Every structure is written in structure tokens, then in C-alpha cells.
Amino acid sequence: MSAIPSQTLGITRYQLFCVLAASISSLNFGWNISATNLPGDTITKCLAGPKHNIAGLPSCLPASDITWGLVVGGFPIGALIGALSCTRFADKYGRKSVLMYSNLISIASAVLFGTAVNIPMLAVARVVAGIAQGCANGTFTNYVVEITTPRARNSLGCMTQMSISVGQMLSIIASLGLSTPPLWRILFALTGLISLVNMALLVFCVESPKWLACKGRLDDAKSALKQLRKSGDCTEEFQALVDSVSAEMGPKAYTASIFDVIRGKTPDNLRHQLLLAVLAMAFQQLSGISGVAFYSTKLFGSVTTQAVKYSVKPTMAQILTAVLAIVGALATLFGMGMAGFFGRKTLMLFSHCSMALFSVLISVGTVMGFNALAIAMVFAFYSVFLVGPGPLPWVFPGEMTPIYAVSSIVAISGSVGYIGIFTIGMAFAPLLNALGGYTFLIFAATNLLAVVLLMFLLPETKDRSVADTIQTHSVGIHNVMLHQYRVAPSAKKDDVSV
């Protein structure tokens, strides 16, 4: 019996292992996003008692809410730096290499976290951690797209958000026991241990076959592809890969820089792809999700009317935050399943519509004193986000963009996301203090705006040939609802043009 053509395979064991091993970088990203959520008041307001030294290090680091907001925001600023600076490294040295060595920066941040003696030092540690995770997060997205089969990509393409959600969940759960002095230092420094585990597992992973082919290392590319598709015949897929790389890269193996993409100096007109990637990532943050992620304890505290005070036992707001993180991880897993059945555009529009509705209901519940409604809608809001706007903006560039520009567009869109995380993270607490329950009406409006714009700009890319999508939509900014811009689902199951 002849072997099954490799491009028709689903998720193979080694393919899954490589994705899971590499995903620890995004798990670390999620860990750092939520690590400041629970222990913030204990650190800055010295709720556990007067400031004193423990093993020569201060038990708390007094700071105003604005200053603490800058510490919290240091992570996405670092991620912005990492995303912009690592594009060339990922294209030059390989996806696996960047994933591997960005962990060294993360380990350095762990040392700073564990030894911080003042707020500036803690802020620097957050920036350094952000550089490491921003560098790895976008690279991981490209790595997944380039090592998976088309069938496997429908689900595994959402692993970036899945890993972030799991990281947030683990961080919040750990925070329940590690938010007191001096244990909050351990909570922050555990990012270094996660990085060590990531490095150990990446040793057993292969480099992206597509990247290897781009560098002319065809024997290595074929060997890597065989490892990833152990039960399949790689002959046709490998030839298609070589042909795809040759067509996308051109005779001079051109790689577009970030500035080339922004200025439109690329062989294909990628204005539409760039605009869509930026808008999808911008609305990911303008939806209000970063406020929930950073300040869920404060948000639940305002709903449950609990005063902020120190307690060895978790408060109701902290418990609700932990449950929210667990529900988020489950919702992301559910979203990965839905991505195999429903189109990308369908999930995005459904999610943003639902988030607009839930935002209104959060405001109604908070203003009218219906606490149970407000809490339930926060859970619904977070869960629906993780079905569409959470994972899919990371997937779009790889499904619409030639390989010579993928890294740059991912870096640009990721940078927009990190700026959004910083901005919403800084603005949410003051908005909550000033507007109270009316805060989420702002996010209801932004989610409705997302629905309108994505309706006309977002093409359906699920089960479409990437080559056909690139050819059809590389014509400048346009209304995808018009008939001539509709790409039919691939008739063949052997699309390997990504």
C-alpha cells in the first residue's frame, strides 16, 4: 500500500510536539501579562505591613497608581521593541533559533525580577521580559503556519492565543498563593524557569522546512518535512513547497523589511493585507480585553463592592479572576475546535457582535446594581473574545501574505497590538474610576465599529488556497464583498502554498 500524500494529513504526533514545545514562548507571554494582576496592591500599597527587608530585599515597593500603571505597561512596550527588532533575525537565522535564544533575555529578566530593590528596577525587568516575549510571540506564529499541514493549521493556527490564555490562567492561579511578600518575587521570576523548559524542549524540534527552503538548504528542508509528516509521502508536498518558495521569493530571494511594507515598496501590492492585519490587531485591544486581563481583580472588586485589603486568604474578586482565567483557557480550546468548522470571517463578526452586546450588559448590570449579571457578562465577554478576535488576528498574515513579507507584517500588526495593550492597560483603571459602570459602553461602540469595517475588508481565508488569496487580494485596499474578490474554497486538499 502506498503512503498517504503528506499534505492531506491532519495533526501528526511530532508536528504536535513541535507546536506545543514552541508554544511555551507564548505561554510565557500570557504569564507576564497577568503576573501583575493580583499582587499589585500588595506591592505598591504595602498591604501586608510596613516596608521591611527580607533577605536584604524590600518586602514592598511603594508607588502611585500611575507609576504602577507604567510598570504594568512596561511589558507591552518591551514586546513592541522585541517584535520590531526580531523580524530580521527570524528571517536570517531561522524561526527555531529566535525562539531558542530569546529565552536567554527572558532569563535575564527573571534575575532582575528576583532582585529588584525599587520600582524603576522592576519596570526595567518588565521591559526586558517584554522584549523576550515580543520577539518570540510573532516568530512562533510564523513557525506554526510553516510546519503544519493545511488540515492541522485550522486548529493549530490558534495556538498563539491558546498558549497565551493558558499562561494567563497559570499565572493567576499561582498568584493566589504567591502574592504575599516575598513570594511575589518568585511569581515574577518564574518566567525564567518557563524559559529554561522552553529551551530544553526546542532542542528536539526541527527548523521550519519553508525557511530552510528559502535559504537554499533543500536537503535539510526535505529532512525536516519528513520528520513532521512521518506517516506520509512527502514527494508532492516537498516539490510544491520548493515551487511555492521560488514563486514567492523570486530569483533574488527578496525579503521585505518593515519599511518596505509600510511604504508599499514590495513586488505585490500588499496595502490591503497590511491594513487588515493592523485593523484586526487594533480591534483586538480596542475591544476592551486588555482592561479585563490587567484589571479583572479591580473590576470584580468594583462589582462585588469589596474594599481593597490584605488577606492571606484570596478575596472573592481574586477567586473570580482565577475562575475567569480557567474559563478563558477552556474557551480558547473551544475556539480552536470552532476554527475547524466555521470560517474566519464568521467567527470574527460573531465575536465582535457578541462582545458589543455583552459590553452593554456589563454596564447595565454595574450601573443598576445587578452584580450577578455584570459578573456573568464579564465571563461571556472574555469567552467570546477567545473564539475570534483573540486567536485569529495572529493567523491572518500567514494566510494572505507572500513569505517574503510575512515576518514584517506580523511584526507591524503585533506592534499595533502591543501599543494597544499598553494604552488600554494605562487607561482602563482611570476610566473605571471616572466612568464606573459606563466604561464598557465605549467598548460596545468600538466592537460595533469592528463589525462594520471587517465586514467590508476581511476576506474568508479558511480552506482557501493561499496563492489564490494573495493573487486575488494584492490589488490595493478594496471592498471584499464584491464578486471579483471572492476566492473559492480549494478544490484540492493539498494546498501547501503557505
Image (spheres, rainbow, N blue to C red):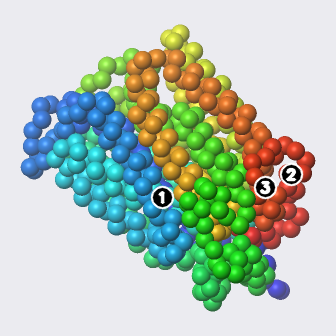
- Residue to which mark 1 is pinned: 84
Circle 3: is it few (<14), some (14-19), or many (20+) Cα within 10 Å? some
Which is nearer the N-term, disc 3 or disc 1?
1
> Residue 438's spot in the image, x, y percent?
52, 17
Residue under the point 68% across and 75% down: 249
| Callouts 1 and 2 close, C-beta under 8 Å | no
Q: Nearer the viewer, mark 3 or mark 1?
A: 3
> Residue 136's spot in the image, x, y percent?
47, 61
| Front-lying residue, 456 or 209 | 456
Disc 1 is placed on an element classified as: helix
Circle 2: is it few (<14), some (14-19), or many (20+) Cα within 10 Å? some
Horizontal side of residue 181 vs 269, given as left or right:
left
Q: At label 2, which amino acid type do we have? A: Arg
- Residue to which mark 3 is pinned: 475
| Front-lying residue, 394 or 351 | 394
Q: CA distance from mark 3 to mark 1?
A: 26 Å
Disc 3 is placed on an element classified as: loop
Is 261 located above or below residue 442 in the figure?
Answer: below
Q: Nearer the viewer, mark 3 or mark 2?
A: 3
Q: At label 3, which amino acid type do we have? A: Val
Q: Which mark is residue 224?
A: none
Horizontal side of residue 466 vs 72, given as left or right:
right
Instruction: Mark yes or no: residue 34 visible.
Output: yes
| Front-lying residue, 477 or 179 | 477
Q: CA distance from mark 3 to mark 2?
A: 13 Å
- Residue to which mark 2 is pinned: 486
Disc 2 is placed on an element classified as: loop
